[in-house]
């Protein structure tokens, strides 16, 4: 596959959307759990507009690498960039670019009603993390890898290993802090937008990191044109509005 221009992608999207349910296809998608909120909403919009059906499997970066390289087929991956940096996973994607779809930075949250600590500078963030009794996060994820870099820079990597209560998926982070199992939630800011939590704020600019979600069409996709159409829709104004409304930035 060559370079995909936005014009070509949109033309493909419009063509498929006009086909209607008579020739409806089914698109198998693998995606990062951190983008589940906006992606599920965008997928529902696309299904209503086009008549096609999307089946989405969510996971952390290590799980997504296994999905991409496993026996179960997929047509499109919308995953953290770290997944496509894995040689085996990247080999399953058609030649060409893996365009960025959305990005989001790191932040801290506390249980709703709890006092907010000061994280306005790297040193104050460091002290807040060190004072916390426990932290809910997902170390085995693309976000976890970014956090590990920040902890190393702050000189608190070993302390954070001891304090971190690993969660299986993003939604469990809010549950753990909301029910008192953990004192702080530390993850991407969009995941922390939950009624059970109060967002303290993003990491200070000097230590901020972004998790970037990039799309790749499977080399052996059974629905390559439908995959291109949905990718085009992900970059359209209605989808961009959903991405922004869910606390992420497009592209």
Image (tube, rainbow, N blue to C red):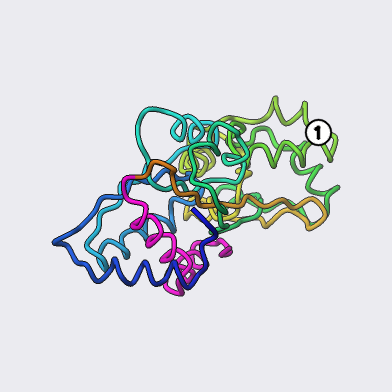
Residue for point 44% across, 58% down: 38
Q: Nearest the camera: 44 or 223?
A: 223
Q: Can residue 239 be found in the magenta stretch?
A: yes
* Crowding near the residue tagged with mark 1, few <14, some 14–19, many ≥20 C-alpha atoms within 10 Å: some
Tag 1's secondary structure?
A: loop
Can residue 112 be seen in the rendering of this structure? Answer: no
Q: How many marks?
A: 1
Which quadrant does the C terminus fall into? Answer: bottom right
70 over 76 or under it: above or below: above
Q: Nearest the camera: 35 or 123?
A: 35
Find residue 58 and report its horizontal and vertical position in percent: 42, 41
Residue identified by numbered label 1:
156
99 over 155 or under it: above or below: below
Magenta segment = 222-251
Compared across the picture, whether 47 is left or right of 33 comes to left
Compared across the picture, whether 182 is left or right of 49 comes to right
Find residue 41 and report its horizontal and vertical position in percent: 37, 60
Magenta residues, dominant SS class? helix
Residue for point 36% across, 67% down: 13
Q: Residue furthest front?
A: 2
Find residue 171 and report its horizontal and vertical position in percent: 46, 43
Residue for point 33% across, 72% down: 14
Find residue 143 and report its horizontal and vertical position in percent: 62, 42
Can residue 43 be seen in the rendering of this structure? Answer: yes
């Amino acid at each position: 596959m060559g370079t995909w221009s936005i014009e070509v992608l949109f033309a493909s999207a419009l063509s498929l959307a006009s086909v209607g349910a008579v020739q409806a296809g089914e698109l198998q998608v693998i995606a990062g759990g951190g983008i589940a909120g906006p992606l599920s909403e965008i997928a529902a919009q696309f299904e209503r507009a086009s008549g096609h059906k999307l089946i989405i499997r969510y996971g952390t970066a290590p799980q997504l690498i296994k999905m991409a390289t496993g026996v179960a087929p997929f047509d499109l991956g919308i995953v953290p960039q770290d997944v496509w940096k894995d040689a085996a996973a990247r080999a399953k994607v058609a030649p060409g670019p893996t365009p960025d779809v959305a990005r989001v930075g790191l932040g801290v949250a506390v249980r709703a009603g709890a006092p907010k600590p000061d994280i306005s500078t790297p040193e104050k963030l460091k002290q807040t993390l060190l004072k916390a009794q426990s932290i809910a996060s997902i170390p085995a994820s693309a976000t976890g890898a970014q956090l590990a870099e920040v902890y190393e820079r702050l000189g608190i990597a070993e302390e954070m290993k001891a304090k971190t209560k690993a969660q299986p998926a993003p939604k469990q982070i809010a549950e753990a802090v909301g029910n008192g199992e953990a004192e702080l939630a530390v993850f991407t800011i969009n995941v922390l937008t939950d009624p059970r939590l109060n967002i303290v704020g993003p990491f200070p600019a000097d230590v901020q990191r972004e998790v970037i979600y990039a799309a790749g069409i499977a080399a052996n996709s059974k629905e390559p044109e439908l995959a291109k159409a949905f990718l085009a829709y992900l970059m359209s104004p209605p989808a961009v509005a959903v991405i922004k409304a869910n606390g992420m930035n497009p592209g």
